Amino acid sequence: CTVVNVLGGCDLDLREAIVEAPETVITVWSLMGGSDVIVPEGVAVEMGGFALLGGNDLKVGGPPPPEGAPVVRVRAFSLLGGTDVRSRPARSP
């Protein structure tokens, strides 16, 4: 998945996504904007990339992911913006 932000932003909520692959890669490009990526608890998240005059932030809480859990890799490249990755509990039905 690739997200491009120019003078704006994007909210990407993965809590109801069905992930069949063991690894998912999300690449975020931000120019004077940013993204919020929400992942469910129990998913391993790795974040990398670069931010200039902005910031990329990873705040994943909750219980540790079980062995063999899917991995979400977020690569965020930001100029005057940023990307926040957070975990939240799954939504109630």
Image (tube, grey):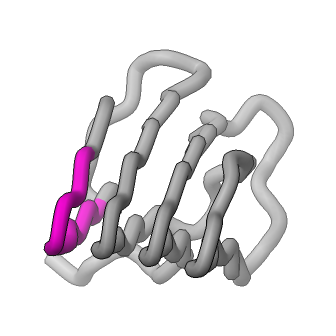
In percent of width and height, residue 21 lies at 48, 17
Residue 10: x and y in percent read 20, 67
Q: What is the x, y in percent for residue 15? A: 33, 62
Q: Verify whether residue 5 appears in magenta.
A: yes
Q: What residue lies at 68% left-to-right and 73% top-to-bottom?
A: 58
Q: Is residue 24 left or right of residue 46?
A: left
Asked whether residue 37 is drawn in magenta, I would say no
Quarter of the view holding residue 32: bottom left
Looking at the figure, which quarter contains the N terminus?
A: top left
Helix, strand or loop: magenta stretch: strand
- Farthest residue, direction top: 21
Query: Image point 54% across, 75% down: which residue?
Result: 87
Identity of the residue drawn at 38% across and 31% down: 19
Q: Is residue 3 above or below residue 21?
A: below
Q: In the shown orientation, is residue 74 left or right of residue 11?
A: right
State the residue at coordinates (37%, 74%).
36
Position above or below: 17 against 35: above
- On screen, residue 68 above or below 31: above
Q: Nearer the viewer, residue 21 or 37?
A: 37
In the rendered image, residue 91, in percent from the top left (x then y), is placed at 27, 79
**Number of marks in the rendered image:** 0
Quadrant housing the C terminus = bottom left
Q: Along the horizontal axis of the image, is 68 left or right of 81?
A: right
- Side of 36 relative to 24 (left or right): left
Range drawn in magenta:
4-13
